[in-house]
Amino acid sequence: MLNVKKYAPMGWNSWDCYGAGVTEETVRKNAKFMADNLKKYGWEYIVVDIQWAGPEAKTHDYIPFQDLAMDEYGRLLPAENRFPSAKAGRGFKDLADYVHSLGLKFGIHIMRGIPRTAVHRNLPVYGTDYTARDIAEPNNICQWNPDMYGLNPKHEGAKAYYDSIFALYASWGVDFIKLDDICREMPRLSDELELISHCLHSCGRDMVFSISPGPAVLEYSEFYKKTADMWRITDDFWDKWELLYAMFERAEKWSIHTGAGNWPDADMLPIGPILQDYDQSNRTKLTKDEQITMMSLWSIFRSPLIIGGDMTGFDDFTMRLITNEGILRMHRNARNAHQVWRRPESKSEHILWTASNAEGGSFAALFNTGEEECRIKLDLSELEIDSPDIRITDLWSGGRVKTETANGNQAVYVTTKPHGAVVLEIHQQ
Amino acid sequence: MLNVKKYAPMGWNSWDCYGAGVTEETVRKNAKFMADNLKKYGWEYIVVDIQWAGPEAKTHDYIPFQDLAMDEYGRLLPAENRFPSAKAGRGFKDLADYVHSLGLKFGIHIMRGIPRTAVHRNLPVYGTDYTARDIAEPNNICQWNPDMYGLNPKHEGAKAYYDSIFALYASWGVDFIKLDDICREMPRLSDELELISHCLHSCGRDMVFSISPGPAVLEYSEFYKKTADMWRITDDFWDKWELLYAMFERAEKWSIHTGAGNWPDADMLPIGPILQDYDQSNRTKLTKDEQITMMSLWSIFRSPLIIGGDMTGFDDFTMRLITNEGILRMHRNARNAHQVWRRPESKSEHILWTASNAEGGSFAALFNTGEEECRIKLDLSELEIDSPDIRITDLWSGGRVKTETANGNQAVYVTTKPHGAVVLEIHQQ
Amino acid sequence: MLNVKKYAPMGWNSWDCYGAGVTEETVRKNAKFMADNLKKYGWEYIVVDIQWAGPEAKTHDYIPFQDLAMDEYGRLLPAENRFPSAKAGRGFKDLADYVHSLGLKFGIHIMRGIPRTAVHRNLPVYGTDYTARDIAEPNNICQWNPDMYGLNPKHEGAKAYYDSIFALYASWGVDFIKLDDICREMPRLSDELELISHCLHSCGRDMVFSISPGPAVLEYSEFYKKTADMWRITDDFWDKWELLYAMFERAEKWSIHTGAGNWPDADMLPIGPILQDYDQSNRTKLTKDEQITMMSLWSIFRSPLIIGGDMTGFDDFTMRLITNEGILRMHRNARNAHQVWRRPESKSEHILWTASNAEGGSFAALFNTGEEECRIKLDLSELEIDSPDIRITDLWSGGRVKTETANGNQAVYVTTKPHGAVVLEIHQQ
Amino acid sequence: MLNVKKYAPMGWNSWDCYGAGVTEETVRKNAKFMADNLKKYGWEYIVVDIQWAGPEAKTHDYIPFQDLAMDEYGRLLPAENRFPSAKAGRGFKDLADYVHSLGLKFGIHIMRGIPRTAVHRNLPVYGTDYTARDIAEPNNICQWNPDMYGLNPKHEGAKAYYDSIFALYASWGVDFIKLDDICREMPRLSDELELISHCLHSCGRDMVFSISPGPAVLEYSEFYKKTADMWRITDDFWDKWELLYAMFERAEKWSIHTGAGNWPDADMLPIGPILQDYDQSNRTKLTKDEQITMMSLWSIFRSPLIIGGDMTGFDDFTMRLITNEGILRMHRNARNAHQVWRRPESKSEHILWTASNAEGGSFAALFNTGEEECRIKLDLSELEIDSPDIRITDLWSGGRVKTETANGNQAVYVTTKPHGAVVLEIHQQ
């Protein structure tokens, strides 16, 4: 059974900065940084993303047909040239131990299926008389990654294989699995997802189960709730305003499915150094206001918050962005969040979200998705607030917001920057 | 401008019982009943539905090509043989006065457009040099009612005609307009809806603006918010389980658009005597449990509540159904309501809704849409409640519901009847 | 039963030049012209198009809500101010007699249904106790013409009404009925078409049955064959290259349904004076080459050939266009015509059609739909001709075309003008 | 350039009877049979179908992941255990020589792309510095066969690989290529098809180029004409009435694209012993009348005729089916064939086809697709024949058919069996 995750996970993932080529040194460095600087705000997962078994992988490109590291049962192992502690078949055990020693949790990315090379070499399936050839489907492949064949979920050898990999991951101490090439493939791969979910949840170790890539299929919302903890509602999110703008509609659709251990996932935060920013030139192209919009939307929507940039290169702005206590409190306490409206307002398009606050009162986030700074009057009746005794805080500035009353209606005036956001916490007194 | 309606309207409408043939006597009798018995619970609107200008109308069938009553400007008038107080061109003035004298409000149904017979007679448009032939579009008709031609919304005579009818209705004292043949016709008729909304909101009298028929087009949600107070999310709702069951999906989709003066409308409540139940045989076919399900869903979703049956014939059960103070409190105080999940649970399909309570705490409604009575364990973590200090009331029974704790999780056990509902009000203490 | 029309009809129709406002004088003048100049080439039908019952109609615009002329049974009559011989209820009798006296045939346009004014006046249906109100469907109207209500094809009064109009037309001596607002409305109006077809074919007089407007629905090809003689495969065709170019695809799709009394109809030929060319300025905008392309395509495809312009104003080119004996022979004798290919060839796109010749040999039409004059080599193997003993005639120029032989293959070289056509008649010797 | 194939190819293919497991002995035996018995009727191609490089292949199932025989450049070779003459790298040379010695032609099946095992072994591409890994696309695979990776058609190594295989086939003496996994994959694989077509037509040997599987995409008809000689208009055709019935619609759509070297292909004839009928029990399930229907439709439509059964086991009926001189003459001489109508006629549905005869006169085929034997009157006006001097032969019976005249119309009466056909050859005298 799923072990309900009470809060949407917060952590770091290697993809946005290191692509398929992250190394152990980098992971350790980022883990140390998180433990020293971010753990106290709730950040806790350190996740190694795709193709960690590939000795040749160095960039965001997948290397096709390379010899992936694996054991005699076709279970992938970290490439030792990239992860030195993996020597002698130790896998990620030592790295996970290190992350745990910092008080953090450790996760890995996997592709559904079995390595193509395991199948062409026809390796045995652990604990069975079957071989890889018996369980692999030759025409069931990922459309964008060259590594695996999908399995026949009706074959008992497929269950054995998936059991064997989760047993291995549990022995390493893995706390988080990001399973790829499955989330948006409904209904074609629903049987395979159900099988993998079953094997993962039977392995004896509690792991967050995250599925990718999106966009998830809205009609399968109940199926995702039953099988996974978090699911991607978008294809890869990157540092482009167009993608950020499009997330409003995705979040609107998925908002009623968020909470109670179900975490529709708006994808990683491409902040700070990304895209193998070894020479400090590939900083996120999102403006500061856009990053504020992103953190505000992800937080009121309660998306998982997974940092994508190299944390050791974060500047002050980025650190404040991810350590704002009011915003992170909203990420924990928002309930029943949803978009209220989207409309031309003042000189720009604006979007209003609201949520109840589990500790009483409510939150509101007002986004300016247009190109001009605006001075906006927000009637509190739009938020269905009509008590005269309220106190309002602007969470990004920390300042108090005064209400004004006209014709018996209360309102507040706020300034919204282009592509920016204002987040209000409203308390009844 | 729209004058925001703080609560979803509650009232009575003549259609479900009297069809196109309601008479003044019936309206007065039902208004009196509401004033005497229901006003104190919040019920207040009395609405006369379609084809009140037709002297021949007697049933739910529309009489085509009859001579509708109208003034010399092509503005429909109540048929005097059905509404005696309308004599001498008084229109609905006397009937509205009577309803107001009871402390209630008065509404009427209208079709968009101008009567076909006004066009064939080529009557002048009030206050202009135009005639009906100038503004009517010969090929713009309703698909299910034979009375009107639609107007050319670009023609200034069309605005003059709509201004003239709302001026007339304002002079009568009308408080509620149900405009038909428009809501689902987006985008084809968006210009005509915008024009009518403008004319109605400029007429100098505050009226609730309700648009029909559904299903409303989800992509037009912001347009509906801008033009109307309530809009039908369904085609005509009748006393059939299939239609009630289908409403869960409609309400799920529209839930994030409810509140702050925006009232997606699940249509009238076909309860008690309906379908011209003069001989007491056409009682609603919904079972008691189904009626409880309907009231629970409409109330947590905050649909307008418009009674469809002849109130003077209501039995005790029906009166309790519409006067349950807890349920009506939920109808006022629910905020950010949404479906939590829909899944097989116990032996039946169950659907869980939740909402925040504007007065603190929350509501939950658990629906059994299957065919067997079930004993359900509801983990409070599903509602994201983890405080030990809570008090839970079953709103339909009025009883206290005890929580039980196992493995650190709180839960309640409730019994759900086939097609029935349990509604819980949860207070933090 | 349908009386098979052996050749696709050839004639004249008033629409392209006179719109809804043609007069008796004009019809007589054009009939006389046809009898004197075109009859000997096979042209024979004279057809009065839409709204001949409207006294106010003067242009291509339909006058809505005018008082159409009709008899006491709601059967439309020619407006006497436009058709003087129609006085005293004589209808089109005298005009038809005149056309017949010239050795030609007479046709009229009708809309399906019964006049709206007949319904609002509730006239009786001839020979029955029903009235117009009984058989008309108030919501069944044409989308582009304001005159009629459709009938309920299940009502026996509807059959009586349609019988009554065809009896009237037969009494006038009508030879051709162009029924409008039906052809493309499949399957919505298939019952009404079947009823009208039955009534027309039972009236005792042989009439060509032509249905409009297109585009006809390809999946209903067998239904059209069963009910009508000719059916429009396109919406109104006018003098624009874009519309002519689009006809190649329509003709390609319908080619296998042409022949044996079935005449998919590419619509009228907008040649010479059109669009109420009273002052000689609205000549067809098709170039001469485009007109040749049109006549070539219509003829090899065996579309009905219906002249749309005012014949009395034709110039020499236009007369040669419609009196080319070779082309008209192809219109009679082409069999199993179809497009062979469409491809870039030389510097332009070219399209090749072929047909067998009922008298032996075959036809080929090569169209240049591009913008440059080309010299084209056409291998005769493309036409599956491999006999050395053939004789080829260029039908538009009348000249002999020589074949050349290279590598054992025969070919001809032809020059194609932009938007022009070359038509070859090929005889085995 | 394509070398136009004047007649639709006729031959034999190993698939229907032997699946992926045909052997040299079987091929030789069938070739000998064709030379002795069928060559004189026009049958000439002997084609070895799929997975001839697989040593393990035995049935209609593809063996995934087996070690396909290939040379050092990744070019597949016949498996020597199945094709003994292929020893020492001789490929199909000796078998082709044998077939040629019989006066017949030799063909093989290929899959687009390069063997997956060649890619995993990273073999060099003949005559280049590229390797298989450079040109293969890891995610471009066939959906139903496990052998190959598709190539990147933009890579010059891909052209080199395809050139290398056609050079090899030319050296063997191959006359016919059936290329699989491409025909219906438009537009996704249009670039790869264009490349393969170019390489094949540049190899220096004339080969028929047949592409599979269907259904071909109608909108790509001109592209097929440009690249191939024959293309499959259907997925695999087998001995089921439902599939045969469905072919009428496919043939109707493609009829205008047949001829002049373009041969839309209705797939192989599953007649006689099929499905590895070693014990004489898997005879075709098509009835005799259905087989007559099939041969009649394929022949008037001029589909390629490729026998699918083991010819050495043919009975007398089957031999007569494929040696009827009149039917085979129609297969050569039909021109501009097309369906005339499909309609209820007598007690069954009937379908009428017609075609011109290149030698003068015409053909007609009347199919009874219903379940009852019928006596049908066929008016010759349906075939646009009105000469009194005609002679009609029933091609399957060989008998003369008399015409009868009533009301000036000529007609013939024919008896049609359930699922059967009557084919008429009509000569003007």
Image (spheres, coloured by chain):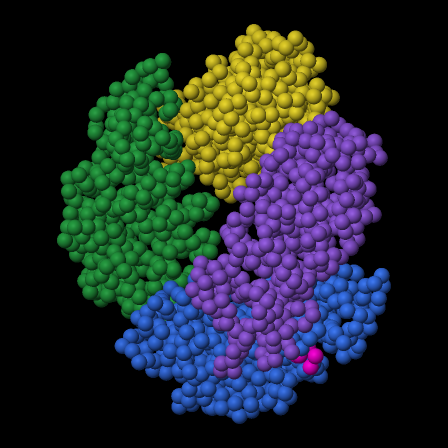
Chain colours: A yellow, B green, C blue, D purple
Is A282 displayed left or right of A247 in the figure?
A: right
Where, by quadrant of the figure, is residue A152 drawn? top right
Residue at the image point whose x is 47% and y is 19% from the top: A201
Q: Residue furthest bottom?
A: C101
Is A33 displayed left or right of B47 in the figure?
A: right
Is D250 displayed left or right of C138 in the figure?
A: right
Magenta residues, start to end: C325-329
Q: Position of residue A252 (x, y in %)?
A: 48, 36
Where, by quadrant of the figure, is residue D83 drawn? top right
Front residue (pair B223, B288)? B288
**Quadrant in the picture for the N terminus of chain C:** bottom left
Residue at the image point whose x is 65% and y is 30% from the top: D56
Q: Position of residue A268 (x, y in %)?
A: 58, 26
Residue C372 belongs to magenta span: no
Residue at the image point whose x is 22% and y is 55% from the top: B18
**Quadrant in the picture for the C terminus of chain C:** bottom right
Front residue (pair D247, C237)? D247
Q: Position of residue B223 (x, y in %)?
A: 45, 47
Q: Position of residue C285 (x, y in %)?
A: 67, 72
Name the magenta segment's main secondary structure. helix
Q: How many marks?
A: 0
Residue D99 to residue B92: above or below? above
Where, by quadrant of the figure, is residue A46 drawn? top right
In the rendered image, is residue C361 in sight? yes
Residue C47 to residue B312: above or below? below
Residue at the image point whose x is 58% and y is 74% from the top: D384
In the rendered image, is residue A169 in sight? no
